[in-house]
Image (cartoon, coloured by chain):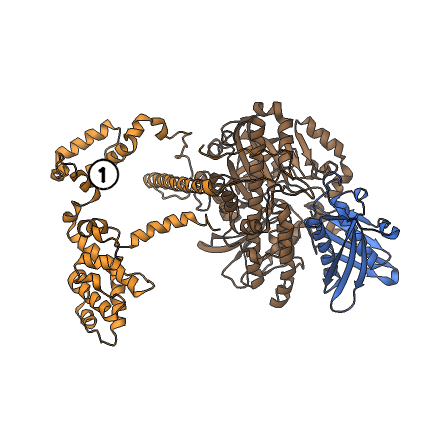
Amino acid sequence: MAEEFTEDELTLPPCKYEYLDHTADVQLHAWGDSLKEAFQQCGIAMFGYMTELDSVEIKQSSEIEAIGHDLESLLFHFLDELLFLFSCEPFLICSKVTITEFVTEGEEMRIKCKCYGEEFRIGKHPQGTEVKAITYSAMQIVNIPEKNTFELFVIIDI
Amino acid sequence: MLDELRNACRPGMVGGFLPGVKQIANVAALPGIVGKSVGLPDVHSGYGFAIGNMAAFDIDNPESIVSPGGVGFDINCGVRLLRTNLFEQDVLPVKEQLAQGLFDHIPVGVGSKGIIPMNAKDLEEALEMGMDWSLREGYIWAEDKEHCEEYGRMLNADPSKVSMRAKKRGLPQLGTLGAGNHYAEIQVVDEIYDKWAACKMGIEEKGQICVMIHSGSRGFGHQVATDALVQMEKAMKRDNIETNDRQLACARINSPEGQDYLKSMAAAANFAWVNRSSMTFLSRQAFAKQFLVTPDDLDMHVIYDVSHNIAKVEEHIVDGKPKKLLVHRKGSTRAFPPHHPLIPVDYQLTGQPVLIGGTMGTCSYVLTGTEHGMLETFGSTCHGAGRALSRAKSRRNLDYQDVLRKLEYLGISIRVASPKLVMEEAPESYKNVTDVVNTCHAAGISKKCIKLRPIAVIKG
Amino acid sequence: MCLFYGFVNNICSVVSVNRDNPVSGGINLFLKKKYQLIFKRNMAKRLLNALGYPQADSLNLNDEVTFKKIIVWLEINRVRSAPPNVLNTLKNFSARDWDNTYIRYKDGLGCPVLGTKLEELQWILGYAVQIETAANRNVYLKYAVENIQTSNVPSVVAENPLDKLDFRSKEFAEGIKELAKVLNIVPHSDPLVTLKAVRKVVTKRMAPDCVENPQKYILTGTPFPFQDADLGFDLNDSVLNQAAKILRMLYIHDLRELQTKANELIVAVQGITAYPKTDTKLGKSWILIRYARSD
């Protein structure tokens, strides 16, 4: 039951992330033209540490939802949901995530996101490093719309 | 460690993190701490607590806290050592086949799934029973349980305190080695420092072959820790617990959050023991098939199994009086002295064996616990090499092909799920484990017993 | 599910139950003598019967007055330990503080906290039986299992010749010393202690199976230089330290035996429960090597 995807959905976004130094773990640094884009990039950065993303074809998609009481916890839960998607059914490895709903105002912040990729298969996808958990450690969210600067720093435990 | 400090002191750093030494100091300021917040020789920066950090809290003090950061994400990550009656000359001719055999038997790396069939009910039982589950199902031997911290089962485990999410993550991963610094190695006894203690462990001579398994509670433990951190954030606000570092999420031991964490942590610890037991079973199968004899005839007994990421209630002597403490050991191994009631009968005279795993291509050590360590560090010592270079730095400075060539030159067969990442785990990325062990020996908190040299490595 | 849960504790608790229960000692001898035929009736009635309580078989133990009667009868005829004032209150069944006095009485006997009155009664009955047995030890000894077996063989004299031995005589002491010498045992100044050691060696090392297959019994392994081992404490006296070391060794030896028994128990249970399996779909070519320990 292969899913059908539009041309637009199959187009991968440019790479706006890097991996920074940390003694035992790795720090994801992602940026974008909007906070939403930075969030999306951060998600892909995490998947990029698990395998080589060129090997991932878009064959199926899954929808996730995350909530948080501030931006930090929103980012934390967003990444945690993505990690969960990979860790058990449907074992989805994604090369593209598209945030469809992005509420960062008010008491309860919310993200809805569509994740595109396929089931992780040893043999097809080179095994990278395993991400154990997302951490709040030294988490930084640079959100300055005036300067058009949106940057995220997250340490993932590996 | 000093690099960390230097980096942290550089002005204008964006996205920096706390250096290990500072983290140790922050832990020392937590409520209810007894004695010192100890940094072991392999210390480096971690999440909340440093890695290589031991801290004990007084159970009877209502202010005392328990912290998931003091255990780490990989709950009950630990090392198990199996001995064999084989010698190097028996194994060298078939080393490649044996390494491949182990690699075929033990699922490794990101996205690998366990090959021991499990359903949700099995998982619940395993979480409650720990190694008793493995015993009941026949995956391991009765003697294995005897040579394991806590006899391979934490009795306060309560699977009902564990989220569905953790169970979902754990189920497919039970019986898998994992990735990162986890490995299974075929090792050779390279040096014996304490003849009698080695003899008690069934190590008679140099050249004897052992198998070391380094793994933990996989996604299950990671999720338990993540869930607890979220819970504790709320508890900290409610109970007005103030810490120097926001990352030091914790809760009072007697609060619902604290108790729930201890119960789910115990379930994760049981998961890890079942996990290492499953891989013990698979390793024995691999050896048995290679040599066409039963694992029993190969005398493949567990020498010991240590956990180096765990919090446990223990009795210690503080100011001359016995006191119940909750001892957090993160990147730190329990090292109890001779005659301690909690160590197996076979090691009553020698002290508890302490297994220190090296890194790919470097030596590993077996130490024994000492009376001095019991007094100085509440019976704790180092856990391994500890990272020296960051992963990104390793990637930049080293080439994976060089690393593999060097291992080949050293006579080490390697089977690795992600060869392009081996430089992250290359010996150059870690502190010299020999220095770490020698420091612990000189400080008297543990005693050198056996040195092991790898001849084959299987990793994620 | 909790199959293996704390099995060592279970073993220990079994042992301690026996120790706390006064019934365990003399009861076997006592019952065997008089009332082997009435095993099917309930324990309390059997004990009452054995103690000679009138019409024990037809009693209703749940009846309060009957219960009080039994307690008083036991105290007057068998236990005989209550002070006069206590006994007087107990005798007065309608006394208001009868229950309190009874509680004081049974506590005085050392009865542990039990769930029901019937259990307490059983305990007190056991206590009475023990007193009775101890008072008539020699009578019951004849009926001990060992002695019954020998007395069934007609040619053997039922009397134990050892009973006539004078254990304090010089002759006996010399004999034991000689025997110890033959067996390579260092004699103790008390010949009875030496005899104990002799008995241990004879039963352990000279049993028929042991003589035939000595390999099965002789411990192998590398000896451990326990003299160099750290004792863990210092008594500031070399002789005491030496003694403490030996005690430690004996303790470790016992512990090892217990652990081995526990392991044997686990292996026995594994024989029923163990069925290791692997999913061939997930792994490579999987052929399981069966490795039951004993076969």
Q: Measuring 18% from the left and 38% from the top, which residue is drawn there? A: C150
Q: On screen, A35 above or below A119?
A: below
- Which residue of the protein is positioned furthest toward the front in this rendering? A1
Q: x and y percent of residue B98 in the render?
A: 62, 29
Chain drawn brown in the picture: B
Q: On screen, C171 above or below A94?
A: above
* Front-most of residues C92 and B148: C92
Q: Is residue B72 visible?
A: no
Chain drawn orange in the picture: C
Q: Measuring 35% from the left and 50% from the top, which residue is drawn there? A: C14
Q: x and y percent of residue B102 in the render?
A: 62, 33
Q: On screen, C167 above or below B264?
A: above
Q: Colour of chain A?
A: blue
Q: Is residue B316 visible?
A: yes
Is B227 left or right of B144, judged from the image as shown?
right
Secondary structure beneath label 1: helix
Residue type at the position of mark 1: Val
Q: Which residue is mark 1?
A: C193
**Label 1 Cα crowd, 10 Å radius (few <14 / some 14-19 / many 20+):** few
Q: On screen, C76 above or below B183?
A: below
Q: Quadrant of residue B405?
A: top right
Pinpoint the chain carrying mark 1.
C
Q: x and y percent of residue B213 in the render?
A: 59, 38
Q: How many marks?
A: 1
* Front-most of residues B122 and C4: B122
Q: x and y percent of residue B25 in the render?
A: 63, 54
* Front-most of residues C264 and C253: C264
